[in-house]
Image (cartoon, grey):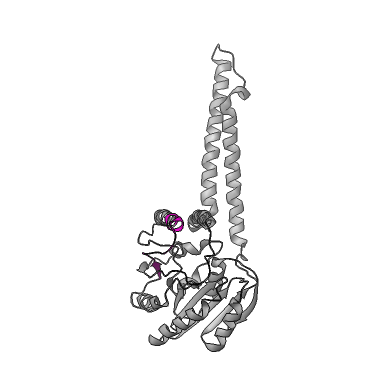
Amino acid sequence: MDLSIVIPLFNEDESLPELMEWIDRVCIAESLTYEVIMVDDGSSDRSWEVIQELGQRFSTVRGIRFRRNYGKSAALNTGFQAVEGDVVITMDADLQDSPDEIPILYHRIKNEKLDLISGWKKKRYDPISKTIPSKFFNWVTQRMSGIHNLHDFNCGLKAYRKEVVKSIEVYGEMHRYIPVIAKWAGFKRIEEQVVQHRARKYGTTKFGLDRFVKGFLDLLSIFFVGKFRNAPMHFFGTLGSLTFLVGFLAMLGILGQKFYSIYFSDVPARLVAENPWFFISLTAMIIGTQLFLAGFIGELVSRFAVNRNNYQISERLRVDE
């Protein structure tokens, strides 16, 4: 199969028929064999019924329905597990991503042998309250990840080689940082494609300002996990050892000063507990020990956390378990 299109959705029953008809026209015109995997993230409207109806009209439609809302990352990760196409394209269900972009994304992945192409909505129709925070987080992500050729990490329209989506894990709110996750997994042929951003035609946006706070925390998490996922002791152990060493050397200095005052000075020796540096050094030693133990526990957790992406699915349409 040439192409798999993964569409995560939440309460988008109005836009799905138009979106599917548009995708079908484009793929038929390009003679692409394809499948569309729609992942219903616990919608409360008729989205699942619409997916079933589309499944009767189009043999290429496959569906997955969550029992409750888990979030976009969970929907993408579950969709990635089900794809069969050589090239995988993700797009939003709200018609703000244009299916007309599918051919160029597909052919660039195939012809340029790229791992990932991220869309760049250079001209956006979002309010300023959304665009300014997005630009800030994209700027921060560029510098923390080292991927300087991407301007829009959060664009839902992306294309991947099949091997990429089968090799990465997306959870929490980390869908906006998939290029970073792919890079840490060893897929470094990452490029950008300017794509059209269309105004929302149906419904309202499902994302609030809290996503930027969560996004920043997830960026820090990805940065840490990417470097220390398999060896958290390298981070916590090093930091803990250095903190403990600073506290221990400070304590030796305090004790040395005490002994000097007792045996070699006429000045009465001050009680150790009266020296504020005693408590600072003691605190540093305690914190250093705790950081070291955190690294040890992290090592244990990293070896046994195998159920992070188990989601309760109530129904499937042409998707094998």
- For the point 59% across and 83% down, which residue is it? 52
Quarter of the rendering occupied by the C terminus: bottom right
Q: Where's residue 320, x and y in %?
A: 59, 82
Q: Furthest-top residue in view? A: 266
Q: Is residue 230 left or right of residue 42?
A: left
Residue toward you, 256 or 274 = 274
Number of numbered discs overlaid on the protein picture: 0
Residue name at image x 35 percent, y 61 percent: 149
Above or below 89: residue 284: above
Q: Is residue 148 visible?
A: yes
Query: Seen in the image, is 276 located left or right of residue 131?
Result: right
Q: Position of residue 265 (x, y in %)?
A: 54, 13
Q: Residue furthest left?
A: 112
Compare residues 253 and 116 and report the one nearer the observer.
116
The x and y percentages for residue 168 are: 50, 68
Q: Which one is in front, 173 or 86?
A: 173
Q: Residue at x 59, y 71 (%)?
A: 41
Q: Position of residue 81 (x, y in %)?
A: 54, 75
Q: Nearer the viewer, residue 110 or 24?
A: 24
Q: Is residue 66 magenta?
A: no
User: In the image, is residue 104 above or below residue 231?
Assistant: below
Residue name at image x 57 percent, y 71 percent: 11
Provide the residue span drawn in magenta.
Answer: 115-133
Residue 84 appears in view? no
Reply yes or no: does residue 132 show up in magenta.
yes
